[in-house]
Amino acid sequence: MGALSPKDQDKMAEVAQICMAHSVTALNMMIGREIRIQVPMVKVVNSADIKNILTAFGMGSVTVQIDFKDDFDGNNLLMMKANDIKVIMDLMMGGTGVAAEGDLNEMHLSCVAEVMNQMMGASAIALTEMIHKTVDINPPKTTLVQQAVDIDQIDFLPFAGDEMTLVVCHFESQGLLKGILIRIYPMKETRFICDNFSTR
């Protein structure tokens, strides 16, 4: 398996940090709470690695997938536990962040899909500005992951190839909620980002 140079790893991490800052700003506007983000993790993986990571992170969660469209390949996965989604919906409806009793319903799934849509819309604008190439997104796809077989329903590789760059970002808000945003880029897009992004 290939590897990224330390300089390229730093570039991908900085791009992810900037994109994530725009994403959490969008989330902050929706829920009115400060969001903290951890330093992104960057590594080169294959499809089996990604499936293992999704299985480890995703059991008992909802995964929202948004891939890029047109001539830029990549994928973005938001993973959140049911309780955190309920908290977000309560905050978006003007509540104090109390998770309602009961199972998730279609309103919860629509809510987290719209959250991801807004987060990735903001991120795509930021990425466009950084690499000087238009980056647009497809509509979100939501998967409720209750058992290992549900991972197979997630379209986590909507592009060809079995070597890619994985970027994992954890975020949380004031002890109320937390989530994971995973970005997946094929190596050709990783190379394009590294070649066209100038570190600050």
Image (cartoon, rainbow, N blue to C red):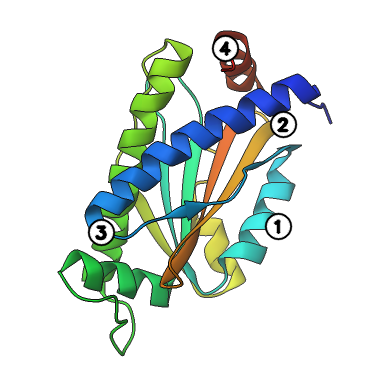
Q: Which mark is residue 163?
A: 2
Marks 3/2: CA distance? 38 Å
The disc labelled 4 sits on which kind of residue?
Ser
Q: Residue at x 21, y 69 (%)?
A: 107
Q: Which mark is residue 177?
A: none
Task: Mark 3: give few (<14), some (14-19) or many (20+) Cα within 10 Å.
Answer: some
* Mark 3 and mark 1 residues within 8 Å of each other at the beta carbon: no
Whichever of labels 1 and 2 marks the residue nearer the N terminus, that label is: 1
Marks 4/2: CA distance? 24 Å
Secondary structure of the residue carrying numbered label 3: loop
Q: Residue at x 62, y 28 (%)?
A: 12
The disc labelled 1 sits on which kind of residue?
Asn
Marks 4/1: CA distance? 33 Å
Q: Which mark is residue 32?
A: 3
Marks 3/4: CA distance? 32 Å
Q: Can residue 145 be seen?
A: yes
Q: Position of residue 44 (x, y in %)?
A: 74, 35
Q: Can residue 160 be seen?
A: no
User: From this viewpoint, which residue is outermost toward the bottom?
Assistant: 101
Q: Which residue is mark 4?
A: 198
Whichever of labels 4 and 1 marks the residue nearer the N terminus, that label is: 1
Left or right: residue 25 versus residue 19 is: left
The disc labelled 2 sits on which kind of residue?
Glu
Q: Looking at the image, is mark 3 or mark 2 nearer the viewer?
A: 3
Q: Looking at the image, is mark 4 or mark 2 nearer the viewer?
A: 4
Q: Quadrant of residue 143?
A: bottom left
Secondary structure of the residue carrying numbered label 2: loop
Relative to the observer, which residue lies in front, 196 or 10? 10
Q: Position of residue 79 (x, y in %)?
A: 48, 59
The disc labelled 3 sits on which kind of residue?
Gly
Q: Quadrant of residue 93?
A: bottom left
